[in-house]
Image: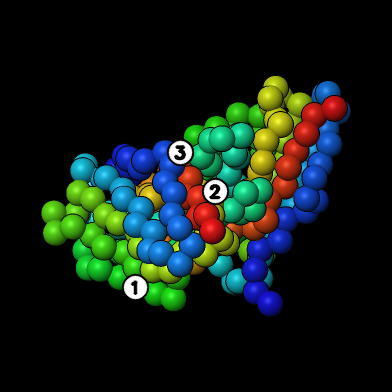
C-alpha cells in the first residue's frame, strides 16, 4: 500500500464544509483511495472510496487530483457528530488483498 | 439487521491466561479480519481470513491465534505468549473482490490485564 500523509488535526465550524486533505504521492495505478472515520471508542466506519474520478455519496465527496497524488474528503455541512479521526488509505488487491494500513489519521473537531 | 457483532465489550485477563474474543457477521462476507488498536494509534492487522478453514498472519500475529470453521465466525484467542495484550480489538469483514473491498467493522472489544 502506498504511504499516505494527513495533517494531525483540523477544526471546522458546525454547518460549514470540512475539507480534509491527504497526500499519496507514491500511489500506484491499481490502488484505490479509501476514507474511513472512527468516532471515539467505536469501530471505524467506511465513508467513501475512489480510483480516478471524483465520487459522491450521502456522507461525503471525494476529490482526487488528476495525477492521483493527493485527494480531499469533503463533508459538505459538518455537524458535531462528525467529530472523529479520519483515515485516508491507499490500497490494492494482490498480495495486499484486503489489508488496510491505518496511519495516525486527522482528528477533526467540529465546534458550535 | 445485518452487521458485525463482537463480544464481550470489555474483557479482563489475568496473567498467564488465554482469552477468546468473539466476532460474528451476518453479511455473508467471505473475508474477515482482526485488528489491534493502541491508545492514540492507528489499527494494526493481526490475522485475516479470505475463506473458511484458511487464514493468514498479519503484521503482529505473535501471541495470537484464530480459527475459521464457519463463514460467519472468526474468533481470536489472545494467548499467554502475548506479553502486552491491553488494547482495543476490532473485527471486520468484507466481500471477496478484485481490489481491497470495503471493510465493515464491529464495535470492538477492550481487553484489560489485571
Asked whether, in this view, residue A64 is left or right of residue B96, the answer is left
Residue A56 marker? 1
Residue in the image at 23% along x and 50% along y: A70
Residue B48 marker? 2
* Residues packed near mark 3 inside 10 Å, few (<14), some (14 to 19) or many (20 plus): some
Quadrant in which residue B16 is drawn:
top right
Letter of the chain that mark 1 sits on in the rendering: A
Q: Which residue is mark 3?
A: A104
Q: Earlier in the sequence, mark 1 or mark 3?
A: 1
Residue under disc 2 on the same chain as residue under disc 1: no
| Residue A59 horizontal/vertical position (percent) | 45, 70
Mark 2 falls on what kind of element?
Answer: strand
Q: CA distance from mark 2 to mark 1?
A: 30 Å
Of tags 2 and 1, which is closer to the observer?
Answer: 1
Q: Are marks 2 and 3 in contact (CB under 8 Å)?
A: no
| Residue B32 horizontal/vertical position (percent) | 57, 56
| Residue B42 horizontal/vertical position (percent) | 51, 39
Residue under disc 1 on the same chain as residue under disc 3: yes
Residue in the image at 54% along x and 58% along y: A112
Amino acid at each position: 500500500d502506498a504511504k499516505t500523509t494527513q495533517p494531525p488535526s483540523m477544526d471546522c465550524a458546525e454547518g460549514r464544509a470540512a475539507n480534509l486533505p491527504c497526500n499519496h504521492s507514491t500511489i500506484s495505478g491499481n490502488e484505490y483511495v479509501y476514507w474511513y472515520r472512527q468516532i471515539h471508542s467505536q469501530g471505524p466506519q467506511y465513508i467513501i472510496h475512489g480510483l480516478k474520478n471524483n465520487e459522491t455519496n450521502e456522507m461525503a465527496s471525494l476529490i482526487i487530483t488528476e495525477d492521483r497524488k493527493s485527494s480531499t474528503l469533503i463533508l459538505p455541512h459538518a455537524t458535531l457528530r462528525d467529530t472523529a479521526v479520519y483515515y485516508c488509505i491507499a490500497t490494492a488487491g494482490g498480495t495486499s488483498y484486503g489489508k488496510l494500513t491505518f496511519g495516525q489519521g486527522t482528528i477533526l473537531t467540529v465546534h458550535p | 439487521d445485518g452487521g458485525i457483532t463482537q463480544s464481550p465489550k470489555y474483557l479482563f485477563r489475568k496473567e498467564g491466561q488465554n482469552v477468546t474474543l468473539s466476532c460474528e457477521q451476518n453479511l455473508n462476507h467471505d473475508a474477515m479480519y482482526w485488528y489491534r488498536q493502541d491508545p492514540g494509534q492507528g489499527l494494526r492487522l493481526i490475522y485475516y481470513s479470505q475463506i473458511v478453514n484458511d487464514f493468514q498472519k498479519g503484521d503482529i500475529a505473535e501471541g495470537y491465534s484464530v480459527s475459521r470453521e464457519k463463514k460467519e465466525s472468526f474468533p481470536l484467542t489472545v494467548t499467554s505468549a502475548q506479553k502486552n495484550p491491553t488494547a482495543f480489538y476490532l473485527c471486520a469483514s468484507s466481500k471477496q473482490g478484485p481490489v481491497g473491498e470495503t471493510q465493515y467493522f464491529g464495535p470492538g472489544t477492550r481487553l484489560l490485564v489485571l
